[in-house]
């Protein structure tokens, strides 16, 4: 970005360019995941650590919901809480993610305890929740724009994992199907909000930096998984250790 503001279309182009360069579908761990070259324990480690991200998304959204100034905005953002937490026990995205970890053979109580998390997973996710809590509403909404790119990664993930892993079933991956419609709906709203409200050069720079930050969060999570469970394979104390059998 230059020192001058740009048109909403130019801003959107810059946002999409960030995704093309920085979204975590480009990460070697993700490519290995959907390419079928990970072992079952490595897939388990991914699902266990990703659970922390999934279960903290509602908390992240609740912090923003509390700051939104209008009923219209709150109604829009409240849908995200229902999408993830559900409107009854056993419903919603977090519950579906636990079905994924169940299907991979992980003990549910262990997953929910968070005892096996990589430290970097906890730090990255907590940093994201804090970012949304502490930054401007505009920046917080902009940080959700990784959802612009999620349908592509979901399609790659589901097709690749079903094709390559005999321990994965469509039922195991049930989390992802609703996200193919939820994520575009959410990103359409967030993008329209950013296009309307990011008017000055400073606001537009902040929006771009917010998306870069969020991409960095997701990339850092995969960096930690790759380091601990692929190469060099240095699992930190207390983190999930696959059953040697």
Image: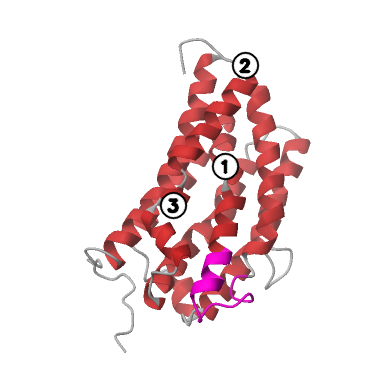
Q: Which of marks 2 and 1 is nearer the N terminus?
A: 2
Mark pair 3, 2: CA separation: 32 Å
Percent coordinates x, y for residue 164 in the rendering: 49, 73
Q: Pointer 3: what residue?
A: 125
Relative to 19, say whether 98 is above or below.
below
Classed neighbour count for the residue bearing mark 1: other residues with Cα under 10 Å, few (<14), some (14–19), many (≥20): many
Query: Element at badge 1?
Result: helix
Identify which residue is drawn at 47% across, 62% down: 50
Residue lying furthest top in this view? 4
Percent coordinates x, y for residue 217 in the rendering: 42, 47
Mark pair 3, 1: CA separation: 13 Å
Label of residue 7 in the image = 2
Relative to 200, say whether 105 is above or below.
below
Label of residue 144 in the image = 1
Asked if the stretch drawn in magenta spans residue 168, the answer is: yes
Q: Nearer the viewer, mark 3 or mark 2?
A: 2
Front in this rendered view, residue 177 or 157: 157
Percent coordinates x, y for residue 158 in the rendering: 58, 65
Write the start and end of the magenta stretch as one range. Answer: 158-173
Mark pair 2, 1: CA separation: 21 Å
Identify which residue is drawn at 62% across, 16% down: 7
């Amino acid at each position: 970005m230059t020192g001058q503001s740009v048109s909403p279309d130019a801003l959107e182009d810059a946002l999409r360019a960030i995704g093309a360069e920085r979204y975590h579908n480009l990460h070697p761990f993700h490519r290995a995941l959907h390419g079928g070259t990970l072992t079952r324990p490595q897939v388990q480690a991914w699902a266990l650590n990703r659970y922390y991200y999934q279960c903290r998304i509602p908390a992240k959204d609740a912090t923003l919901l509390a700051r939104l100034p209008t009923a219209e905005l709150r109604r829009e953002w409240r849908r995200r809480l229902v999408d993830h937490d559900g409107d009854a026990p056993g419903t919603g995205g977090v519950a579906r993610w636990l079905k994924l970890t169940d299907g991979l053979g992980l003990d549910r109580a262990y997953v929910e305890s968070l005892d096996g998390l990589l430290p970097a997973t906890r730090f990255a996710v907590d940093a994201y929740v804090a970012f949304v809590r502490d930054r401007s509403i505009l920046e917080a909404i902009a940080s959700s724009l990784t959802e612009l790119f999620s349908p592509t990664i979901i399609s790659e993930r589901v097709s690749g994992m079903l094709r390559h892993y005999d321990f994965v079933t469509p039922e195991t991956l049930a989390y992802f199907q609703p996200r193919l419609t939820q994520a575009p709906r959410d990103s359409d709203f967030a993008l329209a909000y950013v296009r309307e409200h990011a008017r000055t050069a400073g606001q537009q720079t902040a929006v771009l930096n917010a998306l870069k930050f969020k991409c960095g969060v997701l990339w850092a999570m995969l960096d930690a998984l790759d380091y601990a469970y692929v190469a060099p394979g240095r699992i930190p104390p207390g983190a999930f250790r696959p059953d040697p059998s």
